[in-house]
Amino acid sequence: MKLNICFSTQDNLLTRELSLLSEVVAQSQAAEDVVTWSLDSKLADNRLLASLLKVFRDSDPMKIICPQLDQIAGFSTFKLNPEIANKQVKEIEADIAADSLFPSVLKVPLSYLLDELVCNMQQHSGCSEGSVFAGINPRSNCLDVIVADHGITIYGSYVNAGKYLEYVSESPAEALSLAKDGFSTKNRPDAENRGYGISSNARMVVEGLNGSFSIISGSAVYLYSQKTGQQIIGSSDYFEWCGTTVIARIPLEVPPHFSFYNYIS
């Protein structure tokens, strides 16, 4: 089966990218044989969407063929060993900071975002590798960030820890709702309401920087922007994402009154 994947427009709210991604994922998972993806030039230039496709492709590389995804600038996969992960994240931050379009005021917020989300992968995903993409899109004038794993999902993390099961029930969407509100799976009083680092990072990206913040975890999707508010969608009848992927789109025009310290706990 061959899918010719076309992408003609961009949307600073991520909705167009995520809509196309869901279509491709659903069709690929429904296919009974090996799927070959062919990306049009506009899609290949959209590194955020190409990176999301690569995350999904890498979860089942024997079923999906797409050599175009093997060399994406700004995309890294590394061991979640703390020393290795920290070194890789610092290299990613340095590469972004060297871009002439990157405003220095975003240096600390980017570091906080990446450190928190990669730390969450180490603590909650149950897998040994994680992927990070960070890149500036001159067309949208935004910094795009992806932090992804192929682990047990947010729902699986609650089940594995045996916490909040009366709220989670059998619903990945309910688990994602708890996580975005900061309810932790850790058995430490000081960790309560810190959760997965989702709450503070989402607020910083959306409320502080006028960006968009999304999560795909198993069969649940979280979308947050100032225009659309917060939405959680259960996609169990449509597709099943392997692991957890966090996506942030941050405008390079930083609001003049933004303060990073309003969003850290």
Image: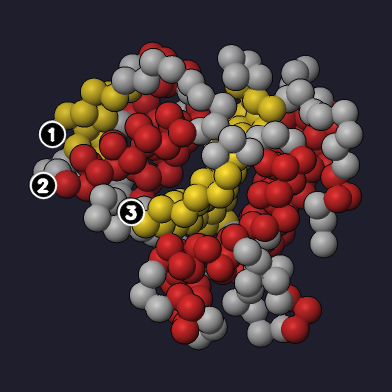
Residue at 28 percent across and 51 percent down: it is 239
Q: Are marks 3 and 2 in contact (CB under 8 Å)?
A: no
| SS category of the residue bearing label 3 | loop
- Report the residue marked by disc 1: 1
Q: x and y percent of residue 202 in the render? A: 66, 49
Q: Are marks 1 and 2 in contact (CB under 8 Å)?
A: yes
Up/down of 131 relative to 255, above or below:
below
Image quadrant holding the N terminus, namely: top left
- Report the residue marked by disc 3: 235
Up/down of 23 relative to 195, above or below:
above
Residue at 41 percent across and 66 percent down: it is 172
| SS category of the residue bearing label 2 | loop
In front of the other: 129 or 181 = 181
Residue 70 visible in the picture = no
Q: Amino acid at mark 2?
A: Glu
Dot 1 crowding, Cα within 10 Å, few <14, some 14–19, many 20+? few
Dot 3 crowding, Cα within 10 Å, few <14, some 14–19, many 20+? some
Give the Cα separation between the discs numbered 3 and 2.
Answer: 20 Å
Side of 5 where 172 appears, left or right: right
In front of the other: 82 or 192 = 192
Q: x and y percent of residue 160 in the render? A: 47, 80
Q: Are marks 3 and 1 in contact (CB under 8 Å)?
A: no
Q: Amino acid at mark 3?
A: Ser
- Report the residue marked by disc 2: 32
